[in-house]
Amino acid sequence: MMFDHRGEAVRTGRATVNGTSLHYRTAGAGPAVVLLHGVPKTSYHWRHLVPRLSARYTVVVPDLRGLGDSARPADGFDSATMGDDIAALMAHLGHASYGVVGEDWGAVIGYQLAARHRDHVNALVFAEALFPGFGFEDHTALTPENVHGGMHLWHLGFYFQPDVPEMLIAGHERELLTYMLKYERTHPDTATPDAIDEYVRCYSMPGGIRAMLSVYRAMLVDAEQNREAAKVKLDIPVLALGGSTFIGERNETQMRHMAHDVTGHDFDAGHDLAEEVPDEMAAVLLPFLADRVRAA
């Protein structure tokens, strides 16, 4: 379960948008903010942040295409299409303008959402992600810098090979997800049993691992989309958040290729800020949103 600032269970729903069906949670009232999770997580990733936002905002927390309790279509896992999913969802819910908070793949998708729907997104928070087309692929290489710096993203090449990852991961979803969630954090105990159980439940369902791998397998398409979108920088304010022991200041460095108005902040944390340091994240996030996300 996920709760709002009053301790009440958030509202849930499903919407058929952009050729798929998305499951979403929503809470609070006021200007809209949409929270986009990464992989291998679901909207449950935001459970600590929702009550910190719902007193001031209408918070929309979708499961991305193919993930969580959303439908698992055969295609459409590139970031532009997944960004269009969220634009259609927000229009369906009646939100003409909104802030976007994304982490990991949700941040890259959030960027595409902001780039493709510039009249609707009024602020972007980009947390702990690398951009395909702007250096993400470099971290797949077996180099001393990647290995000793903790940024050898070995799993990207593994996930790209068709069929073999599905065969090897099946029946071992809990082992893989637990390893990934704990290894990439400074504070591994924040990968709590309830969260791991929820993520394992969703990724173990039919099509769950296929959908996860499809997000990664769209990276080369994403790279072209990002390079094209970056030709016209974002005019909206962007807050780039990093965990000092993972992507860190590279979040801000990358985002300066994509937007004019970028502010950076790093936390004493690893990759999963909203689960590792939710209080600290909220303390930076709320002032940023307060000046920039208002009712339409």
Image (cartoon, grey):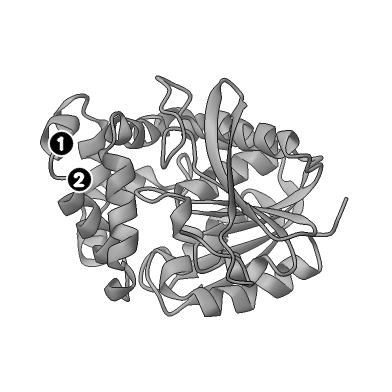
Relative to 82, does residue 44 appear above or below in the rendering?
below
The answer to whether residue 129 is visible is no
Residue plotted at (43% across, 49% down): 42
Return the x and y of residue 117 as percentages of the image width and height: 73, 36
Residue plotted at (28% across, 56% down): 197
Residue flagged by tag 1: what amino acid is it?
A: Ala
Q: Secondary structure at mark 1?
A: loop
Relative to 18, does residue 5 appear above or below in the rendering?
below
Residue plotted at (73% across, 62% down): 57
Return the x and y of residue 218 as percentages of the image width and height: 41, 30
The answer to whether residue 49 is visible is yes
Q: Residue furthest front?
A: 8
Would you name the residue on which mark 1 appears?
170
Side of 225 relative to 27 (left or right): left
Would you name the residue on which mark 2 appears?
173
Return the x and y of residue 138 as percentages of the image width and height: 34, 47
Q: Nearer the viewer, residue 129 or 34?
A: 34
Residue flagged by tag 2: what amino acid is it?
A: Glu
- Structural crowding at the residue carrying mark 2, measured as other residues with C-alpha within 10 Å and reported as few (<14), some (14–19) or many (≥20): many
Return the x and y of residue 59 as percentages of the image width and height: 66, 56
Residue plotted at (36% across, 43% down): 137
Mark 2 near mark 1, Cβ–Cβ under 8 Å? yes
Q: Quadrant of residue 24?
A: top right
Relative to 159, does residue 124 appear above or below in the rendering?
below
- Structural crowding at the residue carrying mark 1, measured as other residues with C-alpha within 10 Å and reported as few (<14), some (14–19) or many (≥20): few
Q: Secondary structure at mark 2?
A: helix
